[in-house]
Image (cartoon, rainbow, N blue to C red):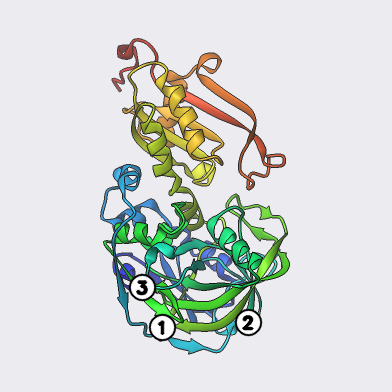
Amino acid sequence: MNFRNAMKKADYRIFREEIAHDDVVRFISENRIERIPAVLNVEGKRVATNFISTRELLCKYLGISVDNLAKFLADVNKTGSIEEIKSDYIELPNLKELPVPKYFEGDAGRYITAGIIVTGTGNDHRSYNASFHRLLVLDNRRMAARLVPPRHTYLRWKNAIEKGEDLEIAISIAPHPIFMFASATRVGDGEEYGYAASLMGRLEVADVDGIMVPDSEVVIRGRITEKMVKEGPFIDITGTYDRVREAPVIEVDAIYAKEDFYFYSITPAGYEHQILMGIPHEPEIYRAVSRVCRVKNVVMTAGGRHYLHAVVQIEKITDGDGKNAILAAFSAHPSLKHVIVVDCDIDIYSTEDVEYAIATRFQADRDLLLITNIRGSSLDPSARDNITAKLGIDATFKGDREKYRRIY
C-alpha cells in the first residue's frame, strides 16, 4: 500500500493551472479546498495536499466508521506484517528539483512540511523511528530540522553527536496517509513501523542506502549534523508564528523519487496539520478515561485546533465520574487546555449539542474544575513560559436522571 493506492479512495481534484511556490496558500483558499484532497501544479511539478484533512478521510482509509475512531485506535496493537519490496526510484540532483512551497510571507524560507524523518538501520523494524519534522531549505544540499526535546529523533541525534557522529536519516515524503498518521502518533521508540503495519494491514518498505523506508513518492537520504543555524519564524498549529530557535543542519547525500512523482504539502495550521497533530491524542485520552469511568467516545474539537480542546463522552454511573474523566483527560494530553465531559445522549460532533449540555447540566459553582499554574502547550500564545490555567466542565446530569431526559 502506498500513496497512489490511497489516492484511489479519495475524491480528489486536479488543478492544471500553474502556480508559484509562494502562491500555494492563496490558491487553496481562493478555490475553497482547505479540506478537499487536491493535486496542484506548482511550477510544473505535482503537489498533493489534504489527503488526510478530515477524520472522514482517515476513517475511509482505515475502513471504519467515524464514531468508532477513538475506540478503534485505543485498541490497536503495535505489531503487524512488514514486507520488503524493491524500490523503483530515480535520483534527483538536488533539492531544487522539489517544488517546496514558501507558505506565508513572514516565513524564514521554503519549508518541507510533510517530511517524515526515519532513523534506524538493518532489517529489524523495531530499531526504526519515524516522526514529522518541519524542514527549512537552506540551499540545494542543506536543510534545518526542527527537533523537539526530549522526543525520540532528538534523543537519537543527541546520542550520535555525543559519540562524535552524524545521525543517518531518510526523509519519507508522500507515503500512504495511514503511515503519515502513524508517524504523527506518539508511540514508544521503535514502535512506529509495527503500529503503521497494524493500521494498514501490511507495511511495505524498501532499502534506500541502508535504511528501510516506507514506500514513498520521494526519499531524501542524509545526515543530521552537529552544525546549528537559526530556524524560523514559521506558522504553527494555532496560526500564529512560532519563535526562532537554533536547529541542527541536515546534509543531503542523495534524493530519490518515483517517475513523475507527487510531492506532498501540509499547509501549516490547516486542517490536515490539525488532524495529524490532534487526533492521535484521542485514543490516549480514551484509554486514560476508561481507567476511571465508562468512556464512550472522545473528540478533539475544531475550535481548539484539534489540539487544545476535547469533548469526552461517558456513561455516567456516579456524580464523581465527570470530574474524574476531566482529570484523566488532562493527564493523558499535557497540552490539553479545556475539556468538556458530556453524557451518552449528547452528540459530541455537534457544537450545538455540546453547548446544550453546558446550558442544561452545568453549574459553574459546582461543576467547574480549574487548575492554575500548570504546564501547558508551548504553542498557546496566551501562556507565559508554557505555564497556563486549565478548565474542565462537567456537563453531565446530576442526581435524578429523569429530569434531564430530552423530550424534544
Please name which of the two marks, 3 or 1, marks the residue nearer to the observer: 3
Relative horizontal placement of residue 218, taking residue 87 as reference (left or right): right
Relative to 128, is 324 above or below?
above
Please name which of the two marks, 3 or 2, marks the residue nearer to the observer: 3
Q: Which residue is mark 3?
A: 205
Residue 53 location (% of width, % of height): 43, 57
Relative to 240, is 234 above or below?
below
Residue at 68% in and 39% down:
383
- Classify residue 37 by image quadrant: bottom left
**Cβ atoms at labels 3 and 1 below 8 Å apart:** no
Relative horizontal placement of residue 232, taking residue 357 as reference (left or right): right
Q: Which numbered disc covers residue 190? A: none
Counting residues from the N terminus, which is met first, the one under dot 1 or under dot 2? Answer: 2
- Classify residue 230 by image quadrant: bottom right
Can I make out residue 44 in this image? no
Q: Which numbered disc covers residue 141? A: 2
Residue 397 location (% of width, % of height): 38, 18
Relative horizontal placement of residue 385, taking residue 326 as reference (left or right): right
Counting residues from the N terminus, which is met first, the one under dot 3 or under dot 1? Answer: 3
Q: Which of the pair 78/74 is nearer the observer?
A: 78
Q: Which residue is mark 1?
A: 258
* Amino acid marked by disc 1: Lys
